[in-house]
Image: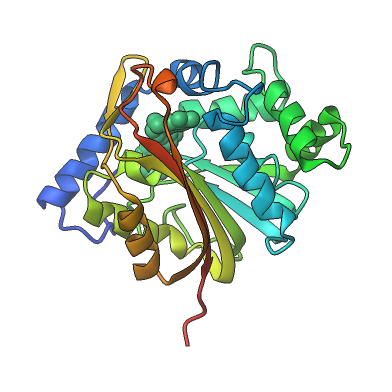
Amino acid sequence: MSGHGAEGSGWPASSPAMSSITAVGESYQKFNPRAYLQNNYMPPRADFTSEDCVVPWKLRCLAEAFATGEIHGHTLIDIGSGPTIYQLLSACDHFEEIIATDYLEVNREVLRQWVQDKMDVFDWSPYIKHVCKIEGRGEQWKEKEQKLREKLRQILPIDVHQPNPVGSPLRQLADAMVSTFCLEAVSPDRLSFEQALQNITSLLKPGGHFLLIGALEESFYLAGEAKLSVVPVSEADVKEALTKSGYKIHDFRSYIMPPGLKIGVDDVSGVFFVHAQKQPVV
Ligand SMILES: Nc1ncnc2c1ncn2[C@@H]1O[C@@H](CSCCNC[C@@H]2Cc3ccc([N+](=O)[O-])cc3CN2)[C@@H](O)[C@H]1O
């Protein structure tokens, strides 16, 4: 399931909104996971010698959110996982099952290869070692790696522009949800960003916690031959969208991209991190 079929999307088949969502889907056909990983998850953006670097900042936000002990349960779902697993490293101690999702089969296959410990996969060990260090529990990195591989039990197709993003309602709503750099990168405009957030919120149980990381004021990014459009969002835009989708915001942090990390692979101004909670409908 990866089409942007008009069926069920809530948009009229021939509407401008539907045609621009379809165009986004077509633009992703050239997405190159290896190039994307090289651009964003290798030095200089992945420099573990400095807490001021963007990747350690993201890992610390996630580790501190889970260290509160507030975020736990049976199932966590990751929306638009892409070819990355770093966003799940601090989560894996707090859930029985983790579901990863992505729109592209190439990304789902990259994740499967990692879970199966195949050869020639991206080396996440610097990330796992760093997370074990900042969590400060003396966990061996190979243990955390194995634990995540055991818990990452489903890798599903997803389309956040569909009311049922994973095709059919989950057997049980997720206890928590994570999403990193997805919604703004797959939405042609603010309205579809807000609608996509509304759609994925249907996968989260009332009272469930949501950790959202994304790009601030980004308009494009590169992934090999693909140049993908991004809807520029501000802190206020993100807060407004979350409030409209019925979330209470517990924590909102922003990272300003330093000049040395503006390396031409995108025009991102900064990164936001949000810890929000879906409010029960009264
Ligand atoms: N309709 C859809 N539904 C769900 N997922 C979909 C859909 N279409 C595409 N996808 C899926 O969503 C995509 C997720 S990757 C999106 C990349 N976002 C931009 C990029 C990320 C990034 C990373 C790190 C840093 N940094 O400073 O550290 C900065 C930046 C800023 N640039 C991709 O996996 C695609 O396959």
In the visual, does 249 lie left or right of 98? left
- Residue drawn 65% across and 54% down? 65
Residue 282 drawn above or below residue 199: below
Q: Name the spot of residue 189 as percent of width and height, x first.
A: 21, 48
x and y percent of residue 140 in the render? 87, 31
Whether residue 220 sits left or right of residue 73 in the image: it is left
Q: Is residue 212 visible?
A: yes
Q: Is residue 3 visible?
A: no
In which quadrant will I find the N terminus? top left
The relative height of residue 22 versus residue 202 in the rendered view (above or below) is above
Task: Report the residue that reaches farthest toward the bottom.
Answer: 282
> Which residue is at a point 62% across and 34% down the rendered structure image?
86
* Residue drawn where x is 61% and y is 65% of the image: 172
In the picture, residue 109 is in which quadrant? top right
Q: How many marks?
A: 0
255 or 190: nearer the eye? 255
Where does residue 262 sit, x and y in percent of width and height?
Answer: 38, 21
Quarter holding ligand 1: top left
Towards the viewer: 13 or 56? 56
Q: Residue at x 55, y 50 (%)?
A: 178
- Please name whichever residue, 44 or 88, is drawn nearer the observer in this view of the structure: 44
User: Nearest the camera: 236 or 191?
Assistant: 236
Q: Residue furthest top?
A: 120
Up/down of 180 relative to 169, above or below: above
